[in-house]
Image (spheres, rainbow, N blue to C red):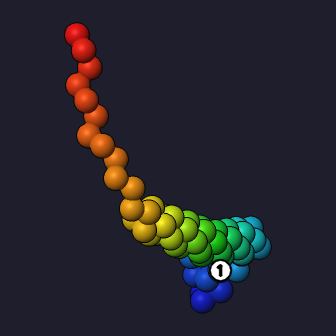
């Protein structure tokens, strides 16, 4: 009876096991992609902040634009 119930609820069907392994691998791949993208985003943010600080350090007096003649 127990074997019949185990087979009925899904037991160890090779197709299900293969699908589960495939999905687990996909999850790992996506997690790795998230880490890579987060690292890339952090590097881009650091570069943008560095560039912004460089621009802030340049002290240029820009005259106000004069209105156009009409």
User: Which residue is found at the position 65% from the left and 80% from the top?
Assistant: 11
Where is residue 59, by image quadrant? Answer: bottom left
For label 1, the residue is 11
- Relative to 44, 15 lies left or right: right
61, above or below 11, in the image:
above
**Residue closest to the eye, 57 or 36:** 57
Crowding at label 1, few (<14), some or many (≥20) Cα neighbours within 10 Å? few
Is residue 29 visible from the viewing direction of this image? yes
Please name whichever residue, 15 or 27, is drawn nearer the observer in this view of the structure: 27
Is residue 24 visible in the rendered image? The answer is no
Which x, y percent locates residue 31?
60, 74
All told, the count of numbered labels is 1
Q: Is residue 22 left or right of residue 4?
A: right
Viewer-proximal residue among 56 and 11: 56
Query: What quarter of the picture does the N terminus occupy?
Result: bottom right
Element marked by disc 1: loop
Quadrant location, the C terminus: top left
């Amino acid at each position: 009876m127990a074997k019949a119930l185990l087979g009925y609820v899904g037991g160890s069907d090779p197709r299900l096991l293969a699908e589960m392994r495939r999905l687990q691998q996909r999850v790992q791949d996506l997690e790795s992609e998230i880490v890579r993208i987060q690292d890339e985003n952090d590097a881009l943010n650091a570069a943008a902040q560095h560039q912004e600080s460089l621009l802030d350090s340049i002290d240029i007096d820009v005259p106000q634009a004069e209105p156009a003649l009409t």
